């Protein structure tokens, strides 16, 4: 079973230590998310230096907050540190994040990504000749010098994030993989995600392209299953709060819960947000309970996704519990651990 891990909370050294431990027990990938308090690029540099053979990826880095050249050089440098193991996972974030956090025009995020990814691939081959690009979103004119040498790889895998059908299509049109959202359910993947990937491949005439579908699953383990379920519910509520994800929740049968979560979030009532998450939503989108219960749920997720990434919740939890959860997931959810062991 192909399995990875991603951790948001914690200092960079703690996360890198967890990554090293995850590789040691057989995890195939380690990913690092990004937020306004965490750089995916910087964190991944430390992870790359502390690991030796697993794939390492940004899951995700904000594409809209960086120029194509900065992204290309950051990925190239990470690939050098890791010895050719990097996956560049990119996303735009929500419309509000694009506009308010990064100060960019939020219009056309899918078209923006479809312009960016091929440009990155040209920049990684700058040693072959000049790059001149005048597009809708980006302008880039660079002439290589005699000192411009190839990187570790000319082609670094690029995975894009997407939720709505048009953004998911981006993966089919230009990407090597799709980084799924923690709110993805099996029904949403079957009814929306995979058809959108295929539509994107058809549009770009990439009929034989391999697009890896990565599922990020919120996982909580505790001796008391109800504690684990509450922790997973809090993280689901955190992701369900933006109205951007209302259509996803509607399509998965949890539209009313989404509306209640958004109303509670507007009042900063975090406890109410958590209680608004129905049991069926936890079952459909997360994996929570005893270690055996979570392992069984991840076996089901492996039937939906090409690669499953376990993600410990952190929303509303004290630092000590975040560290405990991350350690327990690494130790008890490694690919070789037998269910019930």
Image (cartoon, rainbow, N blue to C red):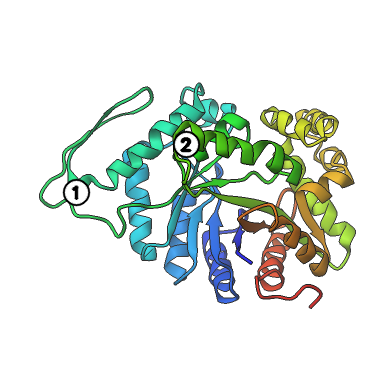
Q: Residue drawn at (56%, 59%), measured in percent from left and top?
A: 11
The answer to whether residue 23 is left or right of residue 299 is: left
Q: Which residue is mark 1?
A: 127
Question: Residue 198: x and y, percent?
Answer: 56, 38
- Circles 2 and 1, Cβ within 8 Å, touching? The answer is no
Regarding mark 2 in the picture, which secondary structure is present there? helix
The quadrant of the rendering that contains the N terminus is bottom right
Does any portion of residue 339 appear in the rendered image? Answer: yes
Which corner quadrant of the image does residue 126 belong to? top left
Q: Is residue 311 above or below residue 53?
A: above
Q: 109 or 210: nearer the eye?
A: 210
Question: In the depicted view, which residue is nearer to us: 228 or 202?
Answer: 202
Q: Residues within 10 Å of mark 2 (few under 14, many from 20)?
A: many
- Name the N-terminal-most of marks 2 and 1: 1
Number of residues whose C-alpha sits closer than 10 Å to that of mark 1, classed few (under 14), some (14–19) or many (20 or more)? some
**Between marks 2 and 1 in the image, the one whose residue lies nearer the viewer:** 2
Where in the figure is residue 189, as x and y percent of width and height?
68, 43
Q: Residue at x 37, y 43 (%)?
A: 71
């Amino acid at each position: 079973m192909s399995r990875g891990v991603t951790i948001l909370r914690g200092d960079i050294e703690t996360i890198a230590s967890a990554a090293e431990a995850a590789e040691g027990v057989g995890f195939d990938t380690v990913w690092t998310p990004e937020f306004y308090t965490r750089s995916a690029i910087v964190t991944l540099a430390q992870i790359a230096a502390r690991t030796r053979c697993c794939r390492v990826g940004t899951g995700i880095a904000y594409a809209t907050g960086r120029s194509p050249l900065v992204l290309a050089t950051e990925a190239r440098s990470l690939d050098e540190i890791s010895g050719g193991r990097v996956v560049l996972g990119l996303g735009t974030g929500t419309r509000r994040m694009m506009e308010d956090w990064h100060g960019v025009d939020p219009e056309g995020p899918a078209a923006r990504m479809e312009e960016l990814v091929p440009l990155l691939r040209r920049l990684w081959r700058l040693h072959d000749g000049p790059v001149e690009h005048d597009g809708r979103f980006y302008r880039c004119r660079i002439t290589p010098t005699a000192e411009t040498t190839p990187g570790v790889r000319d082609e670094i895998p690029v995975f894009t994030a997407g939720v709505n059908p048009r953004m998911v299509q981006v993966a089919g049109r230009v990407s090597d993989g799709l980084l799924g959202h923690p709110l993805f359910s099996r029904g949403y993947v079957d009814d929306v995600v995979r058809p959108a990937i295929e539509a994107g491949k058809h549009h770009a005439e990439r009929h034989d392209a391999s697009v890896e579908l990565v599922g990020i699953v919120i996982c909580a383990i505790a001796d008391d299953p109800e504690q684990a379920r509450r922790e997973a519910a809090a993280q689901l509520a955190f992701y369900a709060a933006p109205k951007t994800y209302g259509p996803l929740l509607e399509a998965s049968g949890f539209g009313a819960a989404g509306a209640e979560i958004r109303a509670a979030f507007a009042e900063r009532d975090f406890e109410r947000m958590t209680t608004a998450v129905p049991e069926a939503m936890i079952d459909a989108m997360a994996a929570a309970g005893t270690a055996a219960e979570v392992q069984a749920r991840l076996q089901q997720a492996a039937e939906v996704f090409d690669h499953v990434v376990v993600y410990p919740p952190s929303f509303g939890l004290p630092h000590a519990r975040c560290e405990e959860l991350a350690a327990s997931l690494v130790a008890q959810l490694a690919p070789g651990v037998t269910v019930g062991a």
